[in-house]
Each structure stands twice: as C-alpha cells, then as structure tokens.
Image: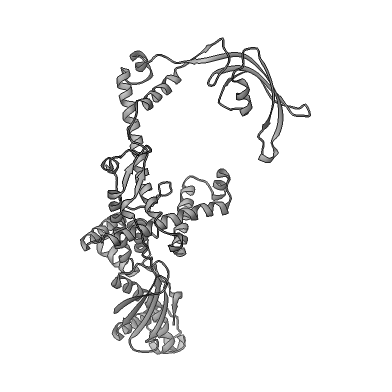
C-alpha cells in the first residue's frame, strides 16, 4: 500500500491511497471466509459455503467485492494516516477512484486537519501571578484568627460598632400586621447580615436602650416575591471581643507549639506552600491564556470546539455521577439553565482549543520535534498504564491512525515547556517572580482536568495517552466508520 498527501482548501488534506491487487485479493479472501462461516445455507456446513453461492446470495461478484472493500477501507485509511503522519480532526470523505470491480484499489480521503495559526509575539508574553511571598501582615492575620477562637465577649459601655456582639429583641411585621420576625434576647454580631443588611446599618452607633424602627425588604422564594417588613428593635447589651495576648503560654494552649515563634514559623511555612501552589497554577493557566489570546476566534475550526465541548460535557457528567448528582440537580443547585451551562462550557471549550492551536504553532515556529525514541517511550508508558504489550499498543494505534496524534501531543507538551521557560513572570505589584521556584515539582505534561477546574490546553485530546490515543487503543476502529465510505 502507498499513500501520498496534498493540502487542499479549508485546512483539509487529500490523502491518495493505492492498494496492490494482491493485497485486495487477500482482503477479499478473508471476507469470503468470514461470510462462509457466518452464512446459513441449506445443504452446506458453516465455513463450507462455496464462493459462487455467496456471490449469488450477495447479488453478484461485484456486490461481494464492494462489501469486502467497505469493511477493509477503514483499515487502509488508518494505515495511510500513519504512513503520511496526518492527525485528522474530523471524519474523512472517502471516494473510491478505481478498483471497485476488479484489480488494484485506489481511493482518495479528504479530511480536515488543524490549521497552523499565526502567534505573533509569543516569545514576549507576560504573566501575572499572586505573590508567593508570605508577609508578616499575613502571618499576623492568621495569628489573629487563632486568637479569635479563644476570644471572650466583654460588656462595654459605648455605642455599638462593627464586629460587636449585641443582645437585641427584634420583631418584624407585614403591612397587614402579620408578625413574620420575632426573637427576644437574640445575640447578634454586627456585620454578619444574618437577618437584613438594614439591621446592621441601624445597629452601628446605637446605644443600650435605643429602640430602632425601620422598614426593609425581606427576601422570599421566588425572589420577585420580596416583602416589605416593618422592624422594631430594642438594643439591650453591647459586647466586644477581647482577644487573648500573644504569649508563649497562649501559643502552647492554642496549638501544638510551645512558643509564639514556633507557631508563626509553622503558619508561615503552611501559607508559603498554599501561596506557591496558587502561584504555580496561575503561572500555567496565565501562560496558556496569554498564548490563546494571540489566536483569533475566526481561526478556530468549529469541529474542534464541538469535540472539546462534548468531552467537557462527558467529564462533567462523569464527575456528577461519581457524586450521586444528576445534571438536573446540578443545574438547580447552580441556578442556571441548560442553555446557560452549554454557552458557558462552549466559551471554555473555544479558549481551550485556541490554547491548543497556539501551542502547536509554537512547536512549529521553534522546530520542536519528537524523536522516535521519545515516541516509543510514550507508547511504552501507555502500554504500562493499559497493562498491554508495547507492540500491541503500537499496532492498535497504527490501525486507528493515531500514531501522528501521539507525536503531535508530545510536541505540544514540549511547546508548553518552552513557553513556561520564556514568559515573563511578575506579581500583582509588577515585581519579578522566580520562574524556577514556580516550576519546582511541577510537571509540564499537557493534560485536561476533570474540570476543572484546572483546565488543560484543550483541543482533541489534551493528554496523548489518556484522551486521544488510549481511546484509539481501546477502540481500534476509531476514525472512520464503514458507513462513511462513498463509492
């Protein structure tokens, strides 16, 4: 078999395939043997039905040959993809140009591929990340949160202010006189907005003995049924929080540390780890967003967006199923409709595909190649994950026409690594941030999240092993169905 390719209009490639007559005869013979085993013809045992009888039952020799070719062309097409190293993004349009009735077979397959998009300025991108440095003020705030759990409420003789705890009698009535709010000796924290925001506003600056009268809208279900309620509030007591002093004795009681110094050191280390993870995620996501911003929307093929959207919907459904939640319940909990969810996911899918296309263009611009040894290493890793022999994985990938996809995904991974090595990284104040610190213990493997979300770089198959190629290993017939062969 021989395969050649040429570019045609609209990001498409025409793959011209020629199959020798001997190979076609082998396919035809195998089809006849299969039909002979499957056919149930009176007077003949399974597997012993003569060819002439099968041809007669199929409508003639040409009809039998057409059926054999219909079954064989998907395999020929997949092998041609591997030979020409084409990574398609859609199902092909196949046209048999010769050999339908006899002799060697020739057919053309026109298939869409990813466009090579321009990414001007990709080498001078800037990414802003939250500062991974922990300040003394942030440590102080954490210490105060710990102190707050040990705070005492102490009665004070002054007007109430934000954060105070007050004892109140609160009653609220509708215009018709029906009482809908009633509580006596209620301990209430000013600023909590537990009842209505207007209550907090009225209490600020009030003194013990004050009677507060005001009206406010009270939320109801559905929201358009809000009701106006007249409130009457008696302020009976004002207390403020008294935090314990920051001493070694307090630190020993409030934590596992014997001193304030040890406690602060532990808090700083914990906060540093959290801030570093946040900065690392922002670094990766910011770099992807920045390079995606170089791609125009009209350069993104709809077929890629729809495939990415389909994958995201599949992942969302799988995650919800694991949590025992239906899609309907999820929509109700998040307060959105199905169309709103689809619109949101479609926007995310488009941005992911733009990142995907941009990274592939970076790989092209920087001449980032994947060696045969690297490809074999990836196939070995896939085989290990799938608990198969590497030869079996390679054979299935070849039959599915996905070898080029594996190599392409590896190039994209290299492009992301190159990008993370070259973007300028600053914090919110514009101060430089060490790229080496951000990349410590970070993998540059291009993967999708299951949502989330930390997103991957998008496109058809963010992870060569798990998304594109391992699906092909599980389903070697992926790529073209028999029904897509056109004579």
Can residue 262 be seen here? The reply is yes
Q: Position of residue 83 (x, y in %)?
A: 28, 72
Residue sitting nearer the eye, 376 or 193: 193
Q: Residue furthest right?
A: 176
Residue sitting nearer the eye, 178 or 326: 178
**How many discs appear?**
0
Q: Is residue 350 left or right of residue 249?
A: right
Q: Residue furthest left?
A: 373
Question: Which quarter of the figure is the N terminus placed in?
Answer: bottom left
Quarter occupied by residue 366: bottom left
Quarter occupied by residue 30: bottom left
* Residue name at image x 32 percent, y 74 percent: 80
Q: Is residue 189 left or right of residue 58?
A: right
Q: Position of residue 84 (x, y in %)?
A: 30, 72
Quarter occupied by residue 16: bottom left
Q: Position of residue 320 (x, y in %)?
A: 49, 48
Q: Is residue 226 above or below residue 394?
A: above
Question: Which quarter of the figure is the C terminus placed in?
Answer: bottom left
Q: Is residue 203 above or below residue 360?
A: above
Please name the colour scheme applied to the rendered image: one colour
Q: Position of residue 237 (x, y in %)?
A: 60, 13
């Amino acid at each position: 078999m021989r395969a050649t390719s040429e570019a045609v209009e609209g990001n498409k490639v025409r793959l011209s395939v020629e199959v020798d007559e001997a190979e076609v005869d082998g396919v035809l013979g195998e089809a006849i043997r299969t039909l002979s085993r499957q056919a149930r013809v009176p007077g003949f045992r399974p597997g012993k039905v003569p060819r002439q009888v099968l041809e007669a039952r199929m409508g003639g020799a040409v009809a039998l040959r057409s059926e054999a070719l219909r079954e064989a062309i998907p395999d020929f097409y997949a092998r041609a993809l591997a030979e020409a190293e084409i990574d398609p993004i859609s199902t092909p349009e196949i046209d048999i140009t010769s050999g339908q009735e006899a002799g060697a077979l020739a057919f053309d397959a026109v298939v869409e591929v990813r466009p090579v998009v321009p990414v001007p300025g990709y080498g001078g991108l800037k990414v802003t990340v939250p500062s991974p440095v922990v300040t003394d003020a942030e440590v102080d705030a954490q210490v105060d949160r710990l102190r707050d759990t040990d705070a005492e409420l102490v009665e004070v003789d002054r007007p109430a202010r934000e954060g105070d705890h007050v004892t109140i009698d609160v009653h609220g009535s509708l215009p018709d006189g029906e009482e809908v709010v009633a509580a006596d000796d209620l301990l209430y924290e000013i600023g909590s907005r537990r009842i209505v925001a207007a209550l907090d506003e009225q209490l600020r600056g009030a003194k013990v003995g004050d009677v507060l009268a005001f009206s406010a809208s009270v939320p109801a279900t559905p929201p358009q049924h809000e009701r106006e309620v007249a409130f009457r509030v008696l302020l009976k007591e004002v207390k403020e929080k008294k935090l314990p002093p920051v001493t070694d004795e307090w630190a020993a009681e409030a934590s596992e540390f014997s001193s304030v110094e040890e406690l602060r050191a532990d808090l700083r280390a914990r906060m540093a780890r959290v801030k570093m993870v946040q900065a690392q995620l922002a670094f990766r996501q910011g770099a992807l967003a920045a390079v995606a911003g170089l791609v125009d929307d009209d350069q993104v093929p709809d077929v890629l967006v729809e495939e990415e959207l389909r994958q995201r919907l599949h992942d969302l459904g799988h995650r919800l199923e694991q949590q025992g939640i239906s899609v309907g319940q999820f929509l109700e909990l998040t307060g959105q409709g199905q169309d709103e969810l689809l619109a949101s996911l479609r926007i995310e899918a488009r941005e992911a595909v733009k990142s995907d296309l941009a990274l592939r263009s970076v790989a092209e611009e920087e001449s980032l190649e994947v060696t045969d040894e690297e490809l074999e290493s990836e196939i070995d890793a896939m085989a290990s994950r799938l608990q198969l022999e590497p030869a079996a994985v390679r054979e299935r990938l070849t039959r599915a026409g996905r070898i080029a996809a594996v190599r392409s995904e590896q190039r994209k991974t290299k492009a992301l690594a190159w990008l993370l090595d070259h973007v300028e990284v600053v914090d919110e104040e514009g101060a430089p941030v060490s790229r080496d610190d951000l990349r410590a213990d970070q993998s540059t493997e291009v993967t999708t999240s299951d949502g989330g979300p930390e997103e991957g770089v998008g496109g058809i198959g963010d992870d060569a092993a798990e998304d594109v190629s391992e699906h092909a290993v599980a389903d070697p017939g992926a790529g073209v169905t028999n029904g897509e062969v056109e004579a």
